């Protein structure tokens, strides 16, 4: 089993994109990352990979909406 990492705001901030600030965008990404983890039954995977995938998805949706 892989190393467990505690997900905190500071651990999530290391994956934040420059120029994207504000808690709303971070909350959207965090919520999507949680959904990804939930879909796996809270097992396996990587919090970093979930965060990066969620960030890509949220940013893509925002780009398509503009």
Image: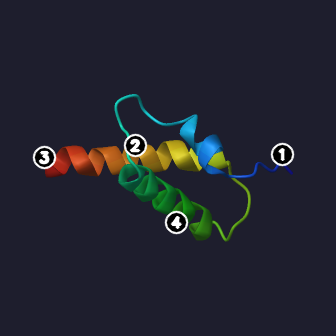
CA distance for labels 1 and 3: 39 Å
Disc 3 designates what residue?
Answer: 66
Q: Secondary structure at mark 3?
A: loop
Q: Is residue 32 above or below residue 14?
A: below
CA distance for labels 1 and 4: 20 Å
CA distance for labels 2 and 4: 14 Å
User: Does label 3 or label 4 sit earlier along the sequence?
Assistant: 4
- Could you classify mark 1 by the number of other residues whose Cα lies within 10 Å: few (under 14), some (14-19), or many (20 or more)? few
- Could you classify mark 4 by the number of other residues whose Cα lies within 10 Å: few (under 14), some (14-19), or many (20 or more)? some
Contact (CB < 8 A) between labels 2 and 3? no
Disc 4 designates what residue?
Answer: 35
Front position in the image: 65 or 23: 23
User: Does label 2 or label 3 sit earlier along the sequence?
Assistant: 2
Disc 1 designates what residue?
Answer: 3
User: Does label 2 or label 1 sit earlier along the sequence?
Assistant: 1
Disc 2 designates what residue?
Answer: 56
- Could you classify mark 3 by the number of other residues whose Cα lies within 10 Å: few (under 14), some (14-19), or many (20 or more)? few
């Amino acid at each position: 089993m892989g190393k467990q990492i505690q997900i905190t705001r500071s651990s999530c901030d290391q994956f934040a994109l420059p120029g994207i600030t504000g808690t709303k965008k971070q909350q959207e990404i965090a919520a999507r990352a949680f959904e990804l983890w939930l879909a796996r039954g809270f097992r396996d995977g990587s919090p970093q990979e979930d965060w990066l995938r969620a960030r890509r998805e949220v940013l893509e949706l925002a780009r398509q909406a503009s």
